[in-house]
Image (cartoon, grey):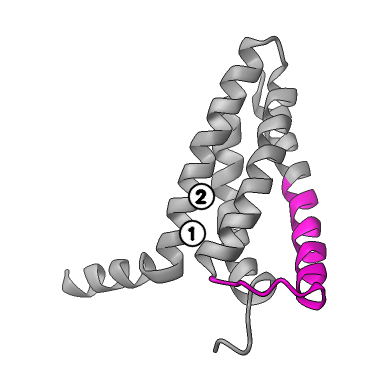
Amino acid sequence: MNWLMSKFAMIFSGSNRRYLVIGITVYLFELLVIVVAEHRGASAVLAVGISFWLGLIVSFILQKVVTFKDKRMHHKVLIPQLAAFTGLVLFNFCFTLGVTKLLSPGLPAVVSRTIALGITTCWNLYLYKTHIFNNPLAN
């Protein structure tokens, strides 16, 4: 049991913990946007689309600067990061809308977004850590 607890503590420490805290905060923000957008007459797909893009802007800034402590803002660093992030975002966006479209007849938009977010969170953490926000000088 101690082995399991030590593995759990290792997984949820440092940047992984910050990633999850920021992710959950942005997720709650996105849910609020979905509820407000649907209340104002937006379809499930439109509401999820709006929340996706607003959450994305907040998430990029917080993940870069807070989670991965990447304060490098020189254009030679920032432009490739933005390009890689944009590619990932476009893929995640299509995936998220696809999941919403597939599940929306039977599930609320909030549930569809949650399922898509859970899946994309896993590959995003890996790509952020190993490619997008990886600072070789910090290692």
Q: Quadrant of the C terminus?
A: bottom right
Residue range corresponding to the magenta coloring: 69-92
The answer to whether marks 2 and 1 mark residues whose Cβ atoms lie closer than 8 Å is yes
Answer yes or no: is residue 108 visible: no
Q: Is residue 80 magenta?
A: yes
Task: Please report the residue visible at 36 percent of the width from the left and 64 percent of the height from the top.
Answer: 12
Q: CA distance from mark 2 to mark 1?
A: 6 Å
Side (left or right) of 46 relative to 69: right
| Prevalent SS, magenta region | helix
Which element is circle 1 on?
Answer: helix
Q: Is residue 68 magenta?
A: no
Task: Please report the residue visible at 48 percent of the width from the left and 52 percent of the height from the top.
Answer: 22
How far across and down, in percent of the image, does residue 91 sit?
A: 77, 51
Task: Please report the residue visible at 62 percent of the width from the left and 76 percent of the height from the top.
Answer: 130
The disc label shown at residue 23, or none: 2
How far across and down, in percent of the image, does residue 44 sit?
A: 68, 21
Q: Nearer the viewer, residue 1 or 77?
A: 77
Amino acid type, mark 1: Tyr
The disc label shown at residue 19, or none: 1
Answer yes or no: is residue 38 visible: yes
Q: Quadrant of residue 17?
A: bottom left
